[in-house]
Image (spheres, helix red, strand yellow):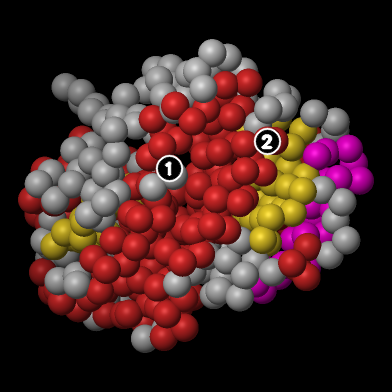
Amino acid sequence: MTDFDDLLTWRESSTSGVAIAAAIEAADGAPSAARDVLATAERIVVTGAGSSYYLAQAAAAAARAAMHRPVFAAPLSELILRPDGVLVAAAGPGSAAREPVVIISRSGSTSEAVDVAERMRAAGHPTVAVTCRGDSPLARTADVALVSPEGDEAAIVMTRSFASMLALLLRLVATVAGDERLASDLGELPGRWAEATAAATVGRRLGETDWGRVVILGGGPAFGIAAEWGLKLTETSQVPTSAYEPLEFRHGPISLCEPGTLVVGLVGGAGAADEVAVVQEAARLGATTWLLVRDADEAGGTGGEVSRVGGGLHPVARLPLLVHPAHALALSLALTRGCDPDAPRHLGQVVILDRE
């Protein structure tokens, strides 16, 4: 059986702290054109596929709150197949300039990402690429490229690329919004990496149980992180996994709770008490629970596992720290279930669709 510490995916995830630090520095040196296009936009679309789409969801929610304007996430496929359901501005330089499209792709070679960049530029929409490869087709096609300099990786599933590109985007949003606290707290992330590592130790231990189902709860910008947790668990171990807004879980899906179900709550900041109460109810119904809170007093009296991640930080600034614990749980569970998380079935690192 493969040793956990020998996994390529784990080794790369474990360097996310370095990648986050480099990404924050890259954001501070980003081309002024990237800041200008976001600062002057009336409405912004953020897009990606797979993990990059969940990253887009987290970044869009954070940007809406910080910038106080419409910022929406959509899958790349919707901009190809149903663009009228995503875009508001009419085609043409005069109106489309108000609606830039931010395109996220680790490799910058995903066929849908390059296709969207070409289509959006042709329609007059400013395009911003967010990638880990500055020489990629997407970076060359977009009007401006933001590159995570240490985010690239050899593993099939995204690890440090996700955390670092998220940190890069959040720092840029904080700068454009003039949110000094968010910007400052993002700068503290490299020094708080030990908190992500400690939480990952809990995740690794929990992954030694072969759960029948895993549920991840996260609200606001954390919903995108919850969805990414779900994807990591699904693609590496094939365990049935769902992600929900915490209070939405109470409206039906809570019937999933029983022994053998693991419920993870990504909570912190506004609404934490209400969201923790849902996790506590899940525990009373028989589920095993794990809370990743910002501050210890947010956990209340829950009897499950509790990890403190990002204590005192802006609730959005802590989000990149929540990704590494997901990898620990997912990779450990994959090994428990007899799967090879470095070679997940049916998957490659870059998705190229033949639409001929």
Magenta includes 291?
no
**Measuring 16% from the left and 64% from the top, which residue is drawn there?**
126
Residue 308 appears at what percent x and percent y? 67, 61
* Residue 44 shows up from this direction: no
Given the image, on which type of amino acid does mark 1 rest?
Answer: Ser
Sort mark 2 into few (<14), some (14-19) or many (20+) by Cα contacts within 10 Å: few
Helix, strand or loop under label 1: helix
Residue 3 appears at what percent x and percent y? 51, 22
**Measuring 61% from the left and 75% from the top, which residue is drawn there?**
312
The magenta segment: 267-288
**Measuring 82% from the left and 48% from the top, which residue is drawn there?**
304
Q: Quadrant of residue 258?
A: top right
Q: Reading the chain from its start, which is encountered first: label 1 or label 2?
A: 1
Q: Which residue is mark 1?
A: 13
Position of 276 relative to 136 (above/below): below
Q: Looking at this view, is 112 or 3 the one in front?
A: 3
Residue 131 appears at what percent x and percent y? 24, 51
| Disc sitting over residue 205 in the figure | 2
Q: Looking at this view, is 252 or 280 the one in front?
A: 280
Q: Is residue 154 left or right of residue 16?
A: left
